[in-house]
């Protein structure tokens, strides 16, 4: 068995010590570290944190030759075990890499464990060295006699480790034990509430995929894991998650955790529950049911697919929908969340430039590297993918000839692929089977085109109203400001906007309007005289220089107002029936 011994070399220097033992080596071995981690589509160059690599057989030191940025070659002498030693700098607090200090440790094996090329299919194991007093270990990897064991290198990489002092709780969902680990929570953290709410989500998603007695859902077998672990790191500011085959690593603001004695459902807690729901849904939709291009991961380079709109976008549709279906939020809260997703897409001119298929393929160079031009040139396969899922769901449900649902499509794909790789052709084939050839053609057009989705018409069929909300000044001008929209620094200028025509640019700071100092952009409206032309004379700071620019204030009707979804006043009986079926699943 190939064994990695992971120890704390120096917590204050954020260094893990790794000792890799390879039994019966061949005459020449190549070892490499992944350049990316599945689920996060960006080359992250984990090898840049590896240092002090050495090799030996018995007492004999061996030479190492570096082949590439992340690969080394060693020539062995005889069949004695090859032992490699190295350190890994670990100070990345995200869910994607490794972290170590005196309070906590965390690592994905993709950041620490060199791949022995040609022997990936053999069993692998991780041994942990001594930990500080009071520290615990949490991972979904099976443990036997102190060794965490994986059937092969792929399985090894799919199990993050949480080390330190943390709260842990357990529950059973779908007959399978689940564990929830929370590090960094405040003393007022309501652990029982988070545990119960997480259990509700897990039960609902297992029933969605695998059915349950009396559910009306055809059984698709049992959950594809023997045990599941949530690893949540609560921090001052942060949000994100990364899915794995039997666990997920999560990061969230500790202020978003539920608080003892406060039954209200805060926006932050709803956001956290949506994250939990999203990553758990990925257990099926991307970890098993996955792009055909991901049947075997290539850890050495980008792995391209045009299907992230399905695997990330459809998951983004179902994450909050499960909050609604389990009763954690009501319909009004859900429609508010979907209004936010709609507005994020409609406010980005890039939706006219890039299709969902292109956005998926370009994730490696665009999605994780946003800049000042991102909203003008790209569309989010998460956000628009979720809207596409909604449109497809409503279209299938409201069909007069052959009513079905997106739920049916997801389960059909799961059954047909045996929970494995699928292609776009198979997705379209399932859509045609459930909704007819026209539905498949419609879906293909939505995926590869740049037109807006016909959601206003589809929502009307469910008795939902597409209304307009109040438009803020930044949106009227075509600006995105820093500090979450509360500052006066310009983060992005939208294509074709009044701000762009006037010459405003990303990086500018707005100081004054019509001779009046501004603290917030909305105060610029107070500088206008009702009887005078609506003109804004702006004083800007750009590259330490003062600059004056003027623009005519667009009328509110000239800029696209935010969308606000709400139930229609007098929906038809059919619309109410369709909506009840959609809401309940």
Image: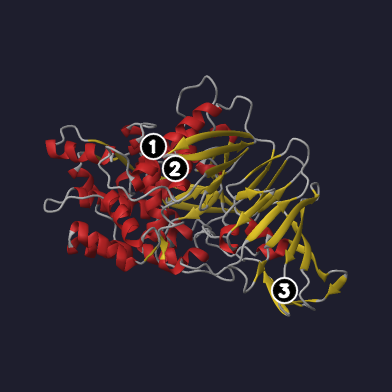
Q: How many callouts does the rendering have?
A: 3
Name the side, left or right, on which 151 lies relative to 129: left
List the residue tagged with mark 3.
Answer: 25
Q: Which residue is mark 2?
A: 277
How far is disc 2 from disc 3 in space, using C-alphas?
44 Å
C-alpha separation, residue under disc 1 versus residue under disc 2: 8 Å
Q: Is residue 395 visible?
A: yes
> In the visual, does 253 lie left or right of 535?
right
* Label 3: which secondary element: loop
Is residue 73 positioned above or below 46 on the image?
below
Are discs 2 and 3 less than 8 Å apart at CB?
no
Name the residue: 19% across, 41% down: 578
Above or below, comparing residue 365 to residue 201 in the picture: below
Q: Position of residue 35 (x, y in %)?
A: 62, 66
Labels 1 and 3: the sequence-earlier one: 3
Q: Is residue 522 visible?
A: no
Left or right, 131 with respect to 368, comes to: right
Residue 434: x %, y % from top left: 21, 57
Query: Furthest-right residue in view?
Result: 59
Residue hosting label 1: 323
- Whichever of labels 2 and 3 marks the residue nearer the N terminus, that label is 3
Q: Where does the image place residue 225, in percent across and percent down from the top left?
A: 48, 49
């Amino acid at each position: 068995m190939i064994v990695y011994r992971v120890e704390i070399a120096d917590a204050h220097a954020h260094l893990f010590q790794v000792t890799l033992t390879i039994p019966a080596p061949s005459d020449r071995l190549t070892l490499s570290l992944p350049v990316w981690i599945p689920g996060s589509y960006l080359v992250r160059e984990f090898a840049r944190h590896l240092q002090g690599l050495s090799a030996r057989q018995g007492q004999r030191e061996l030479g190492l030759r570096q082949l590439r940025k992340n690969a080394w070659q060693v020539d062995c002498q005889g069949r004695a075990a090859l032992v490699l030693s190295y350190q890994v700098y670990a100070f990345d607090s995200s869910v994607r890499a490794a972290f170590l200090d005196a309070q906590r440790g965390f690592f994905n094996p993709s950041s620490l464990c060199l791949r022995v090329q040609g022997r990936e299919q053999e069993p692998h194991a991780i041994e942990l060295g001594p930990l500080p007093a009071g520290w615990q270990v949490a991972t979904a990897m099976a443990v036997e006699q102190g060794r965490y064991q994986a059937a092969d290198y792929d399985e090894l990489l799919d199990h993050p480790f949480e080390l330190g002092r943390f709260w842990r709780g357990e529950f059973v969902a779908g007959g399978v034990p689940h564990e929830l680990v929370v590090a960094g929570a405040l003393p007022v953290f309501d652990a029982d509430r988070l545990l119960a709410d997480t259990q509700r989500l897990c039960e609902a998603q297992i029933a969605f995929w695998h059915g349950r007695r009396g559910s009306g859902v055809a059984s698709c077998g049992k959950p594809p894991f023997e045990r599941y672990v949530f690893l949540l790191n609560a921090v001052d500011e942060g949000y994100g998650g990364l899915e794995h085959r039997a666990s997920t690593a999560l990061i969230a603001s500790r202020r978003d955790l539920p608080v003892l004695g406060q039954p209200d459902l805060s926006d932050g807690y709803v956001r956290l529950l949506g994250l939990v729901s999203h990553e758990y849904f990925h257990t099926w939709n991307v970890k098993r049911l996955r792009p055909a291009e991901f049947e075997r991961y290539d850890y050495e380079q980008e792995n391209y697919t045009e299907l992230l709109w399905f695997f990330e976008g459809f998951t983004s549709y179902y994450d909050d929908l499960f909050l609604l279906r389990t009763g954690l939020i009501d319909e009004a809260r859900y429609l508010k969340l979907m209004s936010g997703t709609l507005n994020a897409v409609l406010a980005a001119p890039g939706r006219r430039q890039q299709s969902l298929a292109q956005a998926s393929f370009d994730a490696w160079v665009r999605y994780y590297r946003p800049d000042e031009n991102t909203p003008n040139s790209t569309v989010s396969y998460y956000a628009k993918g979720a809207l596409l899922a909604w449109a497809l769901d409503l279209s299938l449900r409201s069909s007069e000839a052959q009513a079905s649902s997106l739920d049916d499509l997801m389960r059909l794909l799961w059954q047909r692929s045996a929970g494995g790789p699928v292609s776009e052709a198979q997705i379209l084939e399932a859509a045609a089977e459930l909704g007819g050839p026209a539905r498949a053609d419609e879906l293909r057009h939505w995926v590869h085109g740049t037109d807006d989705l016909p959601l206003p018409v589809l929502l009307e069929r469910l008795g939902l109203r597409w209304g307009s909300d109040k438009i803020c000044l930044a949106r009227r001008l075509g600006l995105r400001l820093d500090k979450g929209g509360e500052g006066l620094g310009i983060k992005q200028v939208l294509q074709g906007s009044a701000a762009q025509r006037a010459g405003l640019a990303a990086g500018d700071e707005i100081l004054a309007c019509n001779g009046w100092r501004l603290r917030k952009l909305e105060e610029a409206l107070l500088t206008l005289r009702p009887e005078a032309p609506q003109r804004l004379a702006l004083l800007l700071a750009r590259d330490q220089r003062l600059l004056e620019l003027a623009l005519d204030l667009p009328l509110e009707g000239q800029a696209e107002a935010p969308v606000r979804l709400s139930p229609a006043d007098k929906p038809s009986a059919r619309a109410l029936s369709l909506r009840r079926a959609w809401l309940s699943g």
